[in-house]
Amino acid sequence: MRRLAAFVLALALAACAREDSVAQGAAASVSAALSTTAPSPAASGAANRNWTKGRYFISAANPYAVEAGEEILKRGGTAVDAAIAVQAVLGLVEPQSSGLGGGAFMLHYDPASGALEAYDGREVAPMSATPDRFMLANGEPMNFMDAVAGGLSVGVPGVVRMLEYAHQEHGSMDWRDLLAPARRLSTDGFKVSPRLNGLLQKVTRLKELPTAADYFYDKDGSPRPVGYVLKNPEYAETLRILGEEGPGAFYRGQIAREIVEAVNGAPNPGGMTELDILSYTAVKREPVCGPYRTLKVCSMPPPSSGGVTLLQMLSLLQNFDLKAAGPNSVEAIHLIFETSRLAYADRNQYLADQDKAAAGGGLTVEEVIDGLLNTEYLKARSGLIDRSAAATSVSAGDPSPFVKSGAAKWKALAPSLSPDPPSTSHFVVVDGEGRVVSMTTTVEFAFGSHLMAGGMILNNQLTDFSFLPERNGVPVANAVAPGKRPRSSMTPLVVFDGEGRLRAALGSPGGPAIIGYVAKTLIGVVDWGMSMQAAIDAPNIVYPRGAPIVETNGLEAGVLEGLSRLGHQVTQRELESGVHGFSVRPDGSFDGGADRRREGVWRTGVVEVRPED
C-alpha cells in the first residue's frame, strides 16, 4: 500500500509540477522524470491496478559491486537495500578501499517526502584512547606507516550499524537476501582485478601481517595474480551470521570477539574491548547545504570536513565567472587553487568531531557551521583573492567578529597535524521509486590497518586524528579522545535546483583531495556544461596540503607556465580519484559517470515497481 500510495501521489504531483511548491516540486520532478506508468496486464484480474516502471541508476568502483546492487534493484529493492549489497561486495573485491570493518557517510533523499537525511557511520576511538596515542616517548609524533600497521590505528567499525539504521527507515528486503551476492562471491571466488593486484605489489608491508599475507599472497610472497580466483570463506561466514542473526550480530558475539582479538593481538595493540564495539552508535545528522550559482548543494556536516570546506570553496568561487574563464584555463585553475587554500586552512584549524569538542568547551556543530559559512565572513575571505597572483601565504581566518555567540572559542585552537592519506570508495544508487543514496565509505589507508578479522580488512581510521594533541600549549580540535570520531574529508553530495528538484548526486575517494575532486567535477557540470563523464575525466587539480597538484599530463604546457607566472609551484602527480555519480538531463534521464582511473562502471535500467496488496 505504501508503494501504491507513493505512485498515486506521484501522478497527481506530475500533473501540476509547474505550479507546485518547492517541496512538492522535488517529489513531482523525480516521480515524473524517472517513472512512466502502464496498466497492469489482464492476467492480474484487477482493471484498476497499475504499476510504475521506474528508472534506476547505479555507479560504483567495481563491476562486481554494480552487478550486486543492480540485482537488488531489479527485484524492487530500495536504494538503501542496494547500498547494503554494494558495500558487502566492495569489502570483498576492493578491500584496499572500504569494507564492513570500516566506516562511512551516507546521504539519503526520498522524493515522496522531499527529505534529505545524513547518516554518520564514522568509526570511534576506543575508551582507552588518550590524546598522546600517536606520540613517541621523546615527544615526537610517530611515523605514519608505523602508526598504520597494527591495532593502534583501528577505530570501532561503524558502517554496519549505519546501514542498519538507514535500512530500518528506508529498507524493504531481508538482510540475508541483501548479503547473498557477496556471500556467493566469497564462497565461489572472484577474479583478482588489475587494481587489486597492483596495490598488493605496492603495499608490501601487508605481507608482515600473517592473516593478510596468507590471504593476499602465495607461499613465495607473490601477490595473487590478475584473474586469480580468490575465495574468502571467513568472510562468507561473517555474512552468514549477519544474514541469519541480523546486522546487530556484528557488534556482539563471534564477530566482535574476532575484531577485539585481532586489534589487541597485533603489533601496536589497540586497547579495544567488546564493550567498545557493543556501545557503538550511528548518528543521523542534519545535512549541511549552501548555494552555488542557481543550485542548492548538500553534503555531510562534521565530523566530516568535506561538506563545510566544499561549500566554502563554492561560495568564494561564486564571485568569479568560471564559465567565461573556461575549463582548464590559467584563470580558472588559479581561482580554484586560491579558494582551496583559504577553505583548507579553515578546515585544518577548526573542523573535527564537534560533538566531542563541544563537550570539552569547544565549538559546537552549529557554531562551526554558522561561522565558517557566514556570508559576511566569506565575503571578507574572498577579498584576499588576487586574480593576478597567488598569495604568498594563507592562514585560517577568524569568524569570531561575524558570529552571534561563542566568539572566544575561535581563538583557542591550533592547526591539526593529520596525514589523512588517500583511499576510500564512493557509490551512488537511485531506486525505481526515485530514492537516492550517495555514500562514501572507507577503511582509510590502502588495506586499512593491514589487520583482518572475520575475513574483513580492519580500518586504520584513528590515524585521521591529529598526531599532535596541542601546539605551543594550544589544543588541537582534531586531537584523539575516547569515543571521539576522527575528522574526515569525505564529501558525498546531493544537488537540487532552485525549485527543489533533484539535479545530481556524486562523491569521490582520495583523502583530503576528495574535496577538490568533487569540486572540479561539480564545476565541470555546472559552469562548463560538461556531461558527468566528461567532468569526471577532466584533469584533477587539487591543493590539499599547502602545495598545488595537477594530474600528470593533464594540462597543456602553456597552462602550467601561466600558473607558474602567477606564483604557483605546481607538482604533477598521478591523482587517482574515484568519482561516481549522475546529473539529471532536462528530459529527466540520467547522465551518469564512473571514474576510469579506477575500475568503476555505471548502469541504468527500468524496473517494474508493483503495488502491494
Image (cartoon, grey):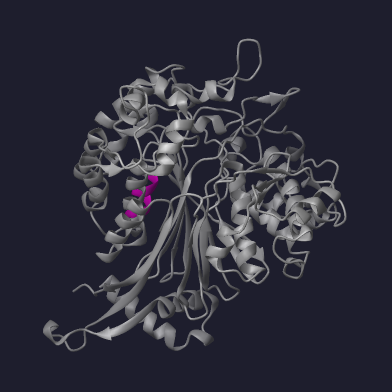
In the rendered image, residue 204, in percent from the top left (x then y), is placed at 46, 26
Count of labels in the image: 0
Q: Is residue 158 visible?
A: no
Front one among 415 and 402 = 415
In the rendered image, residue 563, in percent from the top left (x then y), is placed at 80, 51
Q: Is residue 424 visible?
A: yes
Front one among 402 and 121 = 121
Q: Bounds of the magenta span?
A: 161-168
Residue 499 found in image quarter: bottom right
In the rendered image, residue 11, in percent from the top left (x then y), is placed at 37, 84
Determine the residue positioned at 65% across, 72% down. 294
Up-down: is 594 above or below 53?
above
Determine the residue positioned at 36% across, 42% down. 91
Left or right side of 123 for 543: right
Up-down: is 406 above or below 111?
above
Residue 221 found in image quarter: top left
**Majority secondary structure in the magenta region:** helix
Determine the residue positioned at 39% across, 26% down. 451
Up-down: is 45 above or below 185?
below
Task: Name the quadrant of the C terminus.
Answer: bottom left
Left or right side of 235 for 165: right
Q: Does the magenta-highlighted stretch encompass residue 162?
A: yes
Determine the residue positioned at 63% across, 20% down. 141
Front one among 390 and 220 = 220
In the rendered image, residue 342, in percent from the top left (x then y), is placed at 75, 47
Task: Name the quadrant of the N terminus.
Answer: bottom left
Q: Does the magenta-highlighted stretch encompass residue 334?
A: no
